[in-house]
Image (tube, helix red, strand yellow):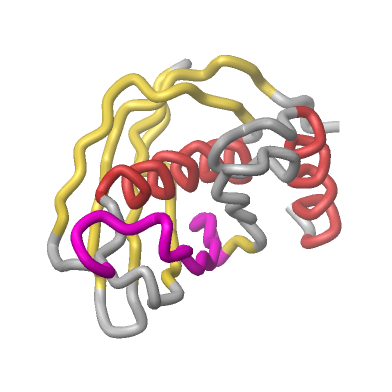
Amino acid sequence: MSEEDLATLIEEIRAEYPGCFACGSDNPVGLHLDPAEMEGEVAVARYRPSPHHGGAGDTLHGGIAATLLDEIMVWAGILSHRVLTVTGTMELRYRRPVSVDDEVQVRGWVEERSGRRLRCAGELRTPDDVAVTASGLYLVARAYDAD
């Protein structure tokens, strides 16, 4: 998919779901994650948490980290297989704390597809290292035409 096609698809989907908590542009309390690029078959987004995304002290709340990873794994299905998925299962491993002051990189990819089922994986990276890893089963809810 060309960069132009990728940008168009992202724009169309975000316009269709402006209230999405994770990526919706019109959700006033949402995260506004922007899956801006693909590195090969990996969907990549950068994100800067706000202080109100904290848990204990200045540590990013685990639920926010989980939401970011869930979202980027859905975008991996959209951008690499042109399918919108819903989460069937998701497993997380919190490896180290993330500060709400850190800009993070969120990465997601499809490891395997079998019919309507996608096995996806992802990671949330700080400037220093991988902080959270995720994997899950995602189920196709809608396919986008390849044009």
Answer whether residue 113 is magenta in the image. no
Q: Quadrant of residue 136?
A: top left
| Above-or-below relation of 84 to 56 | above
Residue visible at 58% across and 43% down in the picture: 29
Q: Position of residue 112 (x, y in %)?
A: 37, 36
Percent x, y for residue 68?
43, 49
The residue at the point 50 percent across, 37 percent down is 74
Residue 24 quadrant: top right
Quarter in which the C terminus is drawn: top right
Would residue 24 appear left or right of 137 to someone viewing this image? right
Q: Which residues are magenta?
A: 39-58
Residue found 67% across the figure and 38% down from its top: 27
Does 86 sit above or below residue 112? above
Instruction: Please give left or right for residue 81 compared with residue 1 in the image.
Output: left
In this view of the protein, which residue sits in the foreground, 127 or 51?
51
Q: Is residue 81 visible?
A: yes
Taking the magenta stretch, the answer to whether it contains residue 54 is: yes
In this orientation, which residue lies closer to the viewer: 27 or 87? Answer: 27
State the image coordinates of residue 3 (x, y, percent, origin top left): 78, 62
